[in-house]
Image (cartoon, coloured by chain):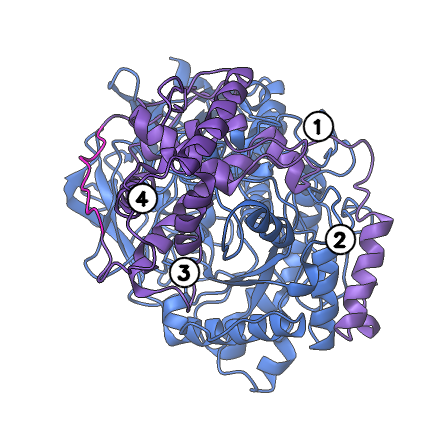
Amino acid sequence: MSENITPYQYLPNMSRRESLKWLTVLAASAVVTSVSGCSFISETEPVKVGHWPDLTPTPIEVAGYGTDPNLILPPESPWPRTLSSTQLTLVAVLSDIIVPRDGAVPSATEVKVPDVIDEWVSAPYQTQQRDRLVVLNALAWIEEESQRRFNLGFVGLSGEQQLKIMDDIAYNNAQTPEEFKRIAKAFDRFRGLVLAAFYTSPEGSKDIGYLGNVPIAGDYPGPTEEARQHLEQVLASLKLSDYAYS
Amino acid sequence: MRDNRHEVIVVGSGAGGAMAAYTLTKSGHKVLMLEAGRDYDPKTETPMFKRNGDAPLMGAATSDKHFGFYDATVDGGWQVPDEPYSVAEGDDFYWWRARMLGGRTNHWGRFSLRFSEHDFKGKSRDGLGADWPFDYAELAPWYDKTEELVGVCGTNTGLDDMPPSAEGVLHPPPQPRVPELLIAAAAKKQGIPMVPMHRAVLTRPKDDRAACFWATPCGHGCSIGAAFQTTTSLLPMAKATGNLQIITQAMVKSVDTDDQGKVIGVTYIDKASGHTHNLKAKVIILAASACESARILLNSKSQHFPDGLANSSGQVGKNLMDSTGAHLGAIIPALKGRPRYNEDGHTSNHLFIPWWGHAAQAKGELDFPRGYHFEIGCGFREPGAGVSGSLQGYGKAVKQQVWDNYGAYVGFSLRGEMLPNPDSYMEIDESVRDKWGIPVSKFHFKWSEHELKQIEHGLKTAKALLETMGADVGELPSAEQAISKGGSIIHEVGTTRMGSSAESSVTNQWGQTWDCDNLFVMDGGVFASNPHKNCTLTIMTLAMRNASWLSAQLKGGVI
């Protein structure tokens, strides 16, 4: 790797403009690493039994937001964040693989998804503590896998190399090889969190097509003409047209 | 002394207590209301239009806020800080409480379905449970008055499970959404009706309350007063009479009697100071919720009432019933990627499936005695902490799956009638006390075969409906796996049931305890049975009727 390129680091409080700058750096670094000819373990060599980091992070025992929080001005930092900057950067890179920028629609990091993930895995509640175990192990597994295959951390891999690992772990179905089953399940949870964090942002909410949360004067207008026509097609395709609601 | 100015003390500010206080203060009686939680102002505290993305953890439910960050419930949920309860070993029971003015009415589902003649006389029909001490005709005009005051949207469907409201009472319901229209067609093919849900949501302005503007979930509370809660309606209206005084943070410990066994007042603990106070009044009305009122009675022991107050029948705490619950849902392939539009509506189901099996039950075609209904979950909801569907891959491909699945899920939530049984009751756990030194409730709960058979029928029906819409449902869970945990539907009733004899019930048809003529219960505890239709409308209707009767007794000098 060229020495004058600073490794990408996700900065939790940077402005959107700053994060775009860092993404450019990341893209450049990815190109550099892909041509640098780093040695790596051939991906054709299967990991015999699969590996698992078996991290057992200490439980988070700080207070939650309590049973009567201010709902109008929700607490912004209800508990300390716990991800290290290395972990946060890995989360950022993975998040943008899951939700890359698509035309005018921002990527996951552009809408601060890693911050939401950090808040989530740092929360003192049961569900989040369970997810913390899953996510921290998934991050460690991905890092370990990257070192095994490419002798390099995941963030430093080329885009192509990163996707080789992704392609092995991002599908959790009957065809998933035994060695990837556990990480595929963990990655599924991580992906679910990243997607939720993305779609709950204003930009993500718009991207999924949520059109509510606006006051309407008068009666609720119901389905649009386009939606009604679609319903009629659906009823016809299911042979339910004769039973239409009236 | 200030307490002498009050003729009636009402314990609780939720559906029953607020309606009782409203009715009495309107009739000129001085009422003092005691609420165990804090004061609450929906006008300034309701998170209207707040987005999940602005809340911690995307608004997800936690052990601090069991129905999500924005749920209106204050200091409550399945557990209340410093106020534990016990559950018998091997049993499951969940007790939802709120510690706030207005109680659970601030967040309830607002489903408002009348009980029918069929519901009030179940025992006469099938020999199970208990009949109510009146018939539907007696309650019908009170339902009209309550619906008029509360504001309920819906239509008269003419179905035997849905007795009609008087002309002009119901507000017009909102138009159905696309998935609801699809389900309605699938249901019709199966011979099952689907009709507008009745909800306590104004669709026309009323009093100081605005009509629904079709946004922001009712469970957050409603600052404009469209979705009914006592804190924007009955309580301010009762206060405006000048006859209502409210003390919040007042945890009632017991109802007090004199040496002759006459009810004279209550003892409460001021949670702010920890001090104990005694208040006197001519009449005491318990409306603290079914299990809290029963707890107060059982904790009100004296020489005259060694087994607890008003418990000569031994029925206080018995006959504990919840609604049955089960859920089955699936992604409907034909709804994938459907055209977007605003489906918020009144933020709950616009159409639902009422119980359609009365005739089949009468003919003996069903192997369970009591009915259920389906509430529908669907629509383009505001994105939250969960993403729908089983996802694969990353990047554009996974975003496409999310786009396709959004709004394609349809879920059926069964809510059914439970019969009382000897294994389901509450008592006092003398070994555990809350922070205020009050012995806590201990719950025992078991479903019977009646409920399990009903769930089995419901699951099969929901599966058939989903398959009619082209969904792949797979194998059904067993009824034992699918049925909700006791209490978790939050329709717990029956613990101070009313009846026509002092031997088998706690109160008469007026909610007046058989043992003490100046002690009343006006919450869900008085329910003789627990029809599948959600209890709140009937709690309010009974409170209005029975408080009116009480007013007449007071004015006539009978009490």
Q: Colour of chain B?
A: blue
Drawn side of residue B543 relative to residue B86, left or right? right
Counting from the top left corner in percent of width and height, residue A123 is at 32, 31
The disc placed on residue B209 is 1
In front of the other: A27 or B252: A27
Return the residue at label 2.
B176
Q: Residues within 10 Å of mark 1 (few under 14, many from 20)?
A: some
Residue B26 in view here: yes
Between disc 2 and disc 1, the foreground one is: 2
The chain to which mark 1 is attached is B
Query: Distance of mark 4 from mark 3, alpha carbons?
Result: 50 Å
Q: Amino acid at mark 3?
A: Ser
Let me know if marks 1 and 4 both belong to one chain.
Answer: no
Name the quadrant containing residue B82.
top left
The residue pinned by badge 4 equals: A150
Expressed as whole percent of the image width and height from the top left, the position of residue B2 reads 41, 14
Disc 2/disc 4 C-alpha distance (Å): 56 Å
Secondary structure, mark 2, is loop
- Provide the residue designation for mark 3: B484
Going from N to C along the chain, the mark reached first, 2 or 3, is 2
